Amino acid sequence: MELAEEGKIKRIFRARGKISYPGAVCHITQRASGKEPLFLEDSDYLYMLHLIKDVVKKFKLDVFCYVLMPNHLHILMRLSTDNLSKSMKDLFERYATYFNKKYERKGHVFGSAFRQALCFSDNYLFAASLYIHLNPVRAHIVQSPTQYRWSSCKLYARAFNGTTFIAYKFILKMLDNDIARARGAYCELLGSSMGIETQEVWEEPKALEYFRIRILEFMPKIISAEHESKEEFIDERKLEEKITQLRTKGRLRSPETLKARKFLIEQLRARGYALDRIGKMLGVSRQAIHKIIS
C-alpha cells in the first residue's frame, strides 16, 4: 500500500514553505510561545479537540492520530484537497483567540508557524503514530501511553465500538485486517518502543528517522522495509546533475527515462516547486507531468 506516488522520498521536514496537495500525509507539530503552557485546564484540551473535529469536517481531512501535550501538540493527518495552510490557520487562530480571551492575555499563543513533515511511506506513517503516542511517556507524565487522556492512543490499544473522527483503523489495518489482532500487535510495538530514546522533532528533524530505524531493528516482521527504496531525498548538487543528465537525453520514452523523470518530479514537488516550474526545469509539458505521476 502506497500513501503517496511510488517514488524515492520517505519523509520531508518543512519548517517553512509548506507543501500542500491532495493526498499529502502530514505530521503537524505546533508548540506554545517560549516556556508558556498551551493548555491549563481540561476545558482547554477539550476545546482544542472540538476545534480539530470541526476542522476535520470543514476541510475534509483524515486525522490518523494526535497527542495534546501541556505545551505542544502533534497531529498526523491526510489532506483531501490543497488546503493545508487554510485548515491549520483556521485551527490555530481560533484556539489562540479562545485562549487569550479566556485568560485575559495578549500576544502570541504559539511560538511560531506550525511545522510540517511529509510522510511518503507506510513505514514513516506507522513510526509517526508510535512516536506521537509515546510523547507523554518521554515527557515522564505517565508510565504507559494508554494512561494519557489527551491522545488517540486508547483507540489503538483498547476495544472501541463508538464513533470518532479519528481514522485509527487505517493505520491498524497495516498490521492486520482483524482490528482485534491489529490492536494486540500495536500494543506490542508500543511496549517495545518505549525504551527508544529520541529528541523532539522540532529540536532534531531527523528524530523520527532514527526512531523508525530502531523500530525496524527489533520488529522487522511487523513493519517490513523490504519494498522501501534505498535512494533518499537527494541534495541540491545531485539533483542538478540528474536534471542535466535527463535533459541531454531529450524526449526519449524508454522505461528507464520515464522512471528517472518521475523521480525528479517527486524530488522537485517535495521542495515545493509548482508543476509549471518543474516542466520548464525538465523540459516537459504540464500535461506530460500529470501523465507521469498518475
Image (tube, grey):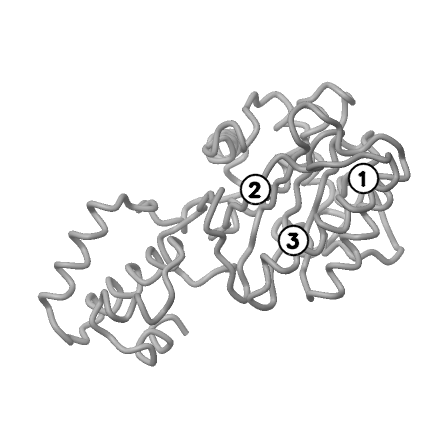
At 14% from the left and 66% from the top, the residue drawn is 247
State which mark lies toward you, 1 or 2: 1
Q: Which residue is mark 2?
A: 222
Q: CA distance from mark 3 to mark 1?
A: 18 Å
Q: Which residue is mark 1?
A: 100
Q: Residues within 10 Å of mark 3 (few under 14, many from 20)?
A: some
Name the amino acid type tagged 1. Answer: Asn
Could you tell me residue 25's position as x and y percent? 55, 55
Q: Which badge, 2 or 3, comes first in the chain's sequence?
A: 3
Query: Quick check: marks 3 and 1 in contact, CB under 8 Å?
Result: no
What secondary structure is marked by label 1? helix
State which mark lies toward you, 3 or 1: 1
Whether residue 266 is situated above or below residue 150 in the rendered picture? below
Check residue 88 in the rendering and tell me which mark sits there, or answer none: 3
Report which quarter residue 279 is drawn in.
Answer: bottom left
Residue closest to the eye, 94 or 53: 94
At 53% from the left and 59% from the top, the residue drawn is 24
Furthest-bottom residue in this view? 287
Q: Is residue 50 left or right of residue 137?
A: right
Q: Residues within 10 Å of mark 2 (few under 14, many from 20)?
A: some
Q: Which badge, 3 or 1, comes first in the chain's sequence?
A: 3
